[in-house]
Image (tube, rainbow, N blue to C red):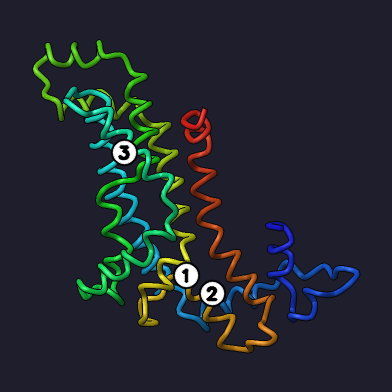
């Protein structure tokens, strides 16, 4: 499907997408890509998307690291119970919390802003916390004890000893966070009302319906889809080796 999307993005007309036998396009013709970039607000939408991606990635990663470090290295009453409760939230479908979350943000007058899409990342992700906790527990505690003898406190142990050894798992979380936020359509479609705040996913839907609802320009839409999916492919390729080590 991905290869077919690329081929169709170079077609000259929308009817060429349905041609049978398939018509091979001119791969030196970039008119569809030029149309998508110039005739839509894709650059502005890219800025909005990057704002959400970077905010969620940074805030969520920092929060998940701190929580996972606490569960992995500190002792306290009820720690295992709290961790079990945290993991149980993974079994709660997002559609169950969608309406209560919308009502909460509506009372806070945040509908139409980016805050409903950023604030939930403050608590981190249960899945990311689980991955980081297991990775922290796989590192020997002798590293912590040696660092304490050198005068390091708990925060310095995390930043100077443990995190430098967590490259694979952090790369894995970065990929998951990037793809999850970059490809999110439901969240922005619920909370973002102003077209000036549209993300790339909403921009593609707008392009589909604004030109010809019954017969959308699929060749131009697929060119936008190629541009839209390209950053996800680049991020995965850049972090592929670390991602495989972290996943295994």
Which residue is at 75% across, 81% downward? 13
Question: Splitting the image into 4 quarters, where does residue 128 fall?
Answer: top left
Mark closer to the chain start, 2 or 3: 3
Q: How many marks?
A: 3
Q: Is residue 52 above or below residue 92?
A: below
**Other residues around mark 2 within 10 Å, as few (<14) / some (14–19) / many (≥20):** many
At 26% from the left and 34% from the top, the residue drawn is 82
Circle 2: element type = helix
Q: From the viewer's perspective, is the residue at label 2 or at label 3 nearer?
A: 3
Q: Nearer the viewer, residue 102 or 47?
A: 102
- x and y percentages locating residue 163 in the rendered image: 29, 29
Residue drawn at the location 37% of the way across and 26% of the way down: 135
- Distance between mark 2 and mark 1 Cα atoms: 6 Å
The correct choice, above or below, for 130 with respect to 73 in the image is below
Name the residue beneath numbered marker 1.
Answer: 200
Real-space Cα separation, disc 2 to disc 3, in angstroms:
38 Å
Q: Nearer the viewer, residue 17 or 27?
A: 17
Q: CA distance from mark 1 to mark 3?
A: 35 Å
Residue labelled with disc 3: 85
For mark 3, give the secondary structure: helix
Q: Is residue 220 left or right of residue 59?
A: right
Question: Does 23 sit left or right of 190 as displayed?
Answer: right
**Which numbered disc covers residue 204?**
2
Q: Eyeballing the image, is 143 above or below 84?
A: above
Q: Tell me if 159 is positioned left or right of 94 in this view.
A: left
Q: Are marks 2 and 1 in contact (CB under 8 Å)?
A: yes
- The numbered disc on residue 130 is none
In the rendered image, which quarter is residue 226 located in? bottom right
């Amino acid at each position: 499907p991905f290869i077919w999307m690329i081929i169709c993005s170079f077609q000259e007309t929308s009817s060429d997408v349905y041609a049978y036998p398939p018509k091979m396009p001119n791969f030196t013709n970039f008119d569809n890509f030029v149309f998508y970039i110039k005739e839509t607000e894709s650059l502005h939408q890219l800025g909005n998307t990057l704002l959400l991606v970077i905010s969620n990635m940074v805030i969520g990663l920092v929060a998940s690291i701190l929580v996972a470090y606490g569960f992995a290295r500190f002792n306290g009453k009820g720690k295992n119970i709290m961790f079990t409760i945290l993991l149980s939230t993974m079994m709660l479908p997002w559609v169950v919390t969608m309406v209560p979350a919308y009502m909460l943000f509506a009372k806070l007058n945040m509908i139409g802003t980016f805050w409903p899409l950023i604030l939930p990342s403050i608590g981190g992700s249960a899945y990311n916390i689980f991955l980081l906790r297991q990775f922290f527990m796989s590192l020997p505690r002798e590293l912590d004890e040696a660092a304490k003898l050198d005068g390091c406190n708990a925060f310095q142990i995390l930043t100077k000893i443990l995190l430098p050894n967590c490259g694979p798992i952090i790369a894995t979380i970065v990929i998951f966070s990037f793809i999850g936020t970059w490809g999110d359509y439901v969240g922005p479609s619920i909370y973002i009302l102003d077209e000036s705040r549209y993300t790339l996913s909403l921009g593609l839907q707008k392009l589909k319906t604004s030109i010809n609802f019954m017969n959308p320009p699929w060749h131009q839409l697929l060119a936008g889809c190629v541009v839209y999916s390209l950053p996800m492919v680049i991020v995965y390729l850049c972090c592929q080796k670390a991602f495989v080590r972290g996943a295994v």
